[in-house]
Amino acid sequence: MKKYKILIDDYTWDADTDESFVDGLRKYHTTPSDDDAKMLRIMAAGWCDWTGEPMRFSSASDLITDAVKHGVLEVTDAV
């Protein structure tokens, strides 16, 4: 299980699958989408605007990698 933290405002959640990661994004976002691919795209666009850096959204792992790389997301092992 991993703990995810959006560093912009300290929002955290635990997830052990891509689906539970995206569900955490849905709970965070003010206008979430029921479609996983669209939800990843929504988050990538917002984080791209915030950082000025590109964010891939073809998969949850791509978005996680880029968000960590560009200082938007922190990933740790959940206790």
Image (tube, rainbow, N blue to C red):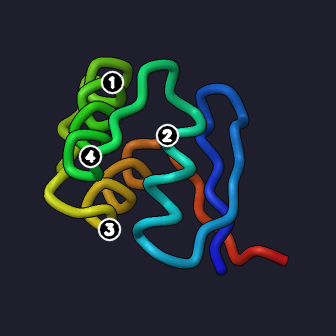
Which of 55 and 14 lies nearest the eye of the viewer?
14
Amino acid under disc 4: Asp
Image mark for residue 35: 4
Question: Residue 3 occupies which quadrant of the picture?
Answer: bottom right
Residue appearing at x 51%, y 52% in the figure: 23
Residue appearing at x 64%, y 73% in the figure: 2
Query: Mark 1 or mark 4, which is nearer the start of the sequence?
Result: 4
Instruction: Calculate the distance from the C-alpha at mark 1 to the C-alpha at mark 3.
Output: 17 Å
Amino acid under disc 3: Ser
Does dot 3 land on a helix, a strand or a loop?
helix
Q: Disc 2 or disc 1, which is closer to the eye? A: 2
The residue under label 3 is: 61
What percent of the width, then of the height, locates residue 74?
A: 59, 54
Picture layout, residue 30 above or below residue 34? above
Query: Mark 3 or mark 1, which is nearer the start of the sequence?
Result: 1
Residue appearing at x 39%, y 58% in the figure: 64
Does dot 4 land on a helix, a strand or a loop?
loop
Residue appearing at x 68%, y 64% in the figure: 14
